[in-house]
Image (cartoon, rainbow, N blue to C red):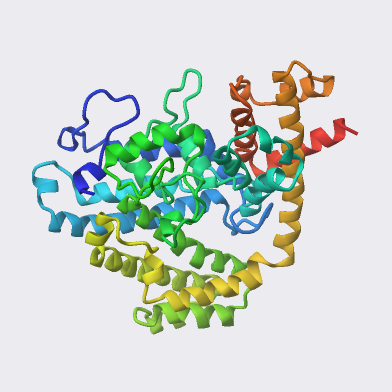
Amino acid sequence: MNWEQLLSLKRQGDTTKRLRKEQDDTRLGFEVDYDRIIFSAAFRSLQDKTQVIPLSKTDFVHTRLTHSLEVSVVGRSLGRLVGKKIIEKYPHLQEIHGFQPNDFGAIVAAASLAHDIGNPPFGHSGEKAIGEYFSIGKGQKFKEQLNEKQWQDLIDFEGNANGFSVLTATRPGVSGGLRLTYAVLGAFMKYPKESLPKKPTKNIADKKYGFFQTDKMFFQEVASELGMIPNKSGNDIGYERHPLAYLVEAADDICYTIIDFEDGINLGLVSEDFALEYLIKLVKDSIDSKKYNELITKEDRISYLRALAIGSLINDAVKIFIENEEDILKGNFPFALTEKSKYKAQMDDIIKLSIKNIYQSREVIEKELTGYQIINNLLDKFITAYNNKNDSKTTNFDELLLKILPEKYHQEKENLYERLLHICHFISMLTDGNALLYNKIISANNN
């Protein structure tokens, strides 16, 4: 892979090449991408989607929106620091093509901002609820009518693939979704493969999948334009990662490790003593003991340690990326950057404590159970109504239910797979609160 191609400013539908040296630096294409994402309805819905604590009304607990904003800030820092090194190593990128170090930051910030845009309500249990509706729930009946890869898309419903669809899918009057630059789409693709084969290798890029069968052709167009390296054979589609996807992943890893931990502390699920013990291991080389000892409140002490910890992890991730940049460009780096971090043991300790005290706390489990039941009910009712309409067998309840479906989902789909995915997409775009509301309306009118 080469950086000139990887930094492509092309957008879906372009017929001429967009050159960096012809860009208006006050309105750079990669920054336009950031703006398009942040003004989108899908991004706004993240303000009422779970990050750690479902349905939490506590103001200091992160939602998907605050998490995404923080990941974009960390991603921007990672991108700018890496960009500075890359421009120094390959000066022709700046001298001939006009690329700047901050371009890398803008690309990673935009991709990081969108990294959770396809996640369903109620956290990761939302993905599992959609998948299990098909694999072990009422949706099993559709298996024989779908091909193997279509079925795998549904039973392993994946927020990353859904996010790619949110950003790129065409609907009547809206061609190419948000029409982001291919560089940002490439950085967004943490798992540049289809749903099968499932985890064919231990390569981090094969851990999950990154696009639905409906989006395969455009995905391949983006990957080809960026010069990404194919790594599958036969009829299977998959590529080595775009290098900047490693930075998007690192930004997410850093934020959820440290900031979810901070949420747990503020909620009283993790004691301050534990927090100090774990975080100080990350910041012992940079802490100002005098300043730290002057902080009076727990919130200020934890905030100070969190900022230092994130700074340490950013610098370490940049160092690892630059040391391995040539292997990354060759597609020979099958690891997450944090796997090679000198702080890996400390991060693993924090994650283990977070799993025990936060992710598996009674409050989280009870609310995830509620969300699981809600998603199953909504899927069942809307899929039944939508399919009945297609088959001209609608009941009065079906017709009433479809009337509350948002206008942009009033589309006819050509086949069963597309209909099922269409409803999954609708459910996935609901906020936690709207999913509760829809469920309440349906339950009240179906008894």
Q: Position of residue 239 (x, y in %)?
A: 36, 48
Q: Where is 362 relative to 15, above or below?
A: below
Pick out the residue farthest to the front.
234
Quadrant assignment, res 429: top right
Pick out the residue farthest to the right.
447
Query: Which one is in front, 370 or 229?
Result: 229
Q: Where is 263 relative to 222, above or below?
A: below
Q: Position of residue 286 (x, y in %)?
A: 34, 78
Can residue 269 be seen from the camera position used here? no
Give me the residue at 36% from left, 49% from top: 109
Quadrant assignment, res 144: top right
Quarter placement of the C terminus: top right
Can residue 290 be seen from the camera position used here? yes
Q: Position of residue 18 (x, y in %)?
A: 22, 31
Q: How many marks?
A: 0
Query: Which one is in front, 49 or 205?
Result: 205
Give me the residue at 25% from left, 55% from top: 329
Give me the residue at 72% from left, 21% from top: 403
Q: Where is 418 relative to 84, above or below?
A: above
Q: Where is 227 relative to 338, above or below?
A: above
Relative to 287, 356 lies left or right: right
Query: Which one is in front, 197 or 243?
Result: 197
Q: Position of residue 168 (x, y in %)?
A: 44, 33
Relative to 405, 27 lies left or right: left
Give me the residue at 41% from left, 47% from top: 192
